[in-house]
Image: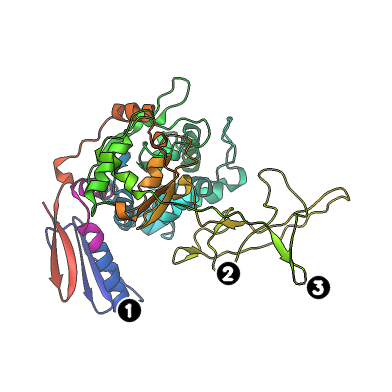
Amino acid sequence: CSRGRCSYLQFETEIIISCCDFHTHRRHYACNGSSTDEFCRNLNLNLKSLNETQTAVFYSIHDWCKRKVLNENPQQFFYYVAGTGKSHLIKSVYAEATKILQKLPCVSEEADISKATVLLTAFTGCASHNINGKTLHALLKLPRSLKPPYQGLGNTLDEMRANFSNVQIMIIDEISMVSKPLFAYVNWRLQQIKGNDKPFGTVSIMAVGDFHQLPPLGKAKPLCVYEHHVLDFWRDHFKMITLTDIMRQKDDLAFAELLNRLTVKQKHEPLSDADRTITSRFSDITNIDADDYKKDPRSGHMQKQGAPFKGEKGDLVDTLQVAVGARVMLTRNIDVQDTRNSVPIILFTLRERRKVRKKGTVRRQFTLKLAFACTAHKVQGMTTHCAVASLKKVFEPGMAYVALRRTTSLSGLHVIDYDEKKIFCSDCSCLQTTKLQTFRFSAKSCGTFDFVEHHGLQTSCCVW
C-alpha cells in the first residue's frame, strides 16, 4: 500500500515490512507461516480496534519515532493519557514504537539490538504484569527509602547504562499511585543513567492512568496536586490527553455512564435515583470461622494446634494455610516475568545461611498467602467478567470506584458490605487535573484505517 502507514505481506517464510518514508526491509524469520500469520492478525486487530483519540495518540508517537530515526531531533515529549481504554493503547504504542526505533543508527549499527528502546513499567507488581512490564523499583533499582539525599547506583551504574543504552521512551501505567518523591527519583535515576541533566535524561515519558483512582500509599499526595515546597516535574512538563470512549464496559453503556458519575461523587453526596441501580447487585455472604486443627495419629481425633512461635507484625505468617488448587499470591517478587498463562511459576532458591546465637530464633516460611480475594490496590488496572466487591474496608478516595469498575458489565458485579458513603472521590484530584495543559494534536496525527485482503492475509494501511 503506497499510501499506507504500515503493511505486512507474507511470502512463504519471508516477511516484507514497508513503512511510510522508509525503504523496504526484508527480514527472514525462522518460524512457520502460522506464527507469522498470527503476529500480523494480532497487529491488525489492535489497530482496527483503536478509536479516534487513541489513533491520534498512536500516530503522534509514531511520527515522533519516525522523526527520531530520520535524525530530525524531535522535541522530547511528556504525555499524560487519562480516561478509558489505556491498556490497549499502551500495547499498540509499545509495539509500533519498538518496531520503528529498532531502525535508529545507534541501535542497528553500534549498540546491542537486544536492548529495549521502549520500557513498560508501573508502581505495583500486578499493574506491571498486566502490561508485561516491570515495577519502577525493579527496573531502575530504586532504594526502599526515597528520602533525600539521592542514592546513586554506585557499582551498578555501568551495567544500567548498558541496559538503557537504546532507551528512548518510558511508558508508566497507573500513574495515580506514583508519589512525588518516587517520580523525582525516576527523573534523577534516568539523568544519572543517561549522563544528561535534561528532564528524565532525555527519555520521553508517556504516563498513563486516572487520578480518580487510588492515590499513592501513605500520606503522599498524587502528582496532580500542586505543593509549593515539593519539586514538581508534573505540572511543569506534562500535557494531558483524555480518552473519552469507554472500552471496558463498551457493551454495557448504562453501567459505564453510572461509573462515570461515580467518578466525581463527593463523600456526603447521596446517590441519584438513576445511580441506585448499583444497589441491585447486593449479595448475601456467610462468614465461617475456622480454627486450626491437626489430627492426632494415635486417637484419630482432631486437636486444636497453637502456633510454635509468633512473630511481630510484618514478619512471616505463623501458619501458612494452603491446599491443592488453592489460589495464592506471592508476597515477594521472585520472578514476575516467568509466568504460564498468567499463573505464576513459583521458584525458591535458598542460598543464605546465618549463624544464630543460642538466644536467637530463625523463622523460615514460603512467601505465599491465600488470595481468593485481593485488595483494591492489587486489582487496579485488571479487567474481569465477574467480581465480588466488598466495601467494608474502604478507607480512602477512589477505593470503591476501583473495585466497582473491574467488571465489563453490571450483571457481572456483586456488591457486599454496601455503604453509600464509601463511594467517593478526592476533591483535590477533581480540581487539579483540570489545571494541566491539554495536548493539541496536529492535523496529520489523525487518519483512518483501510483493511484489505492479500493472499488470504488481512493487512492494514492508514489513509490521510
**Front-most of 184 and 319?**
319
**Residue 274 picture quarter:** top left
- Mark nearer the N terminus (1 vs 3): 1
Region rendered in magenta: 44-65
Residue on which the image places disc 3: 298
**Front-most of 307 and 303?**
303
- Residue type marked 2: Val
Q: Can residue 203 be seen in this snapshot? A: no
- Mark nearer the N terminus (2 vs 3): 3
Could you tell me which residue is drawn at 35 percent across and 40 percent down? 210
Residue on which the image places disc 1: 32
Confirm whether the magenta stretch covers residue 69: no
- Residue type marked 3: Arg
Q: Secondary structure at mark 1?
A: loop
- Residue type marked 1: Asn
Q: Secondary structure at mark 2?
A: loop
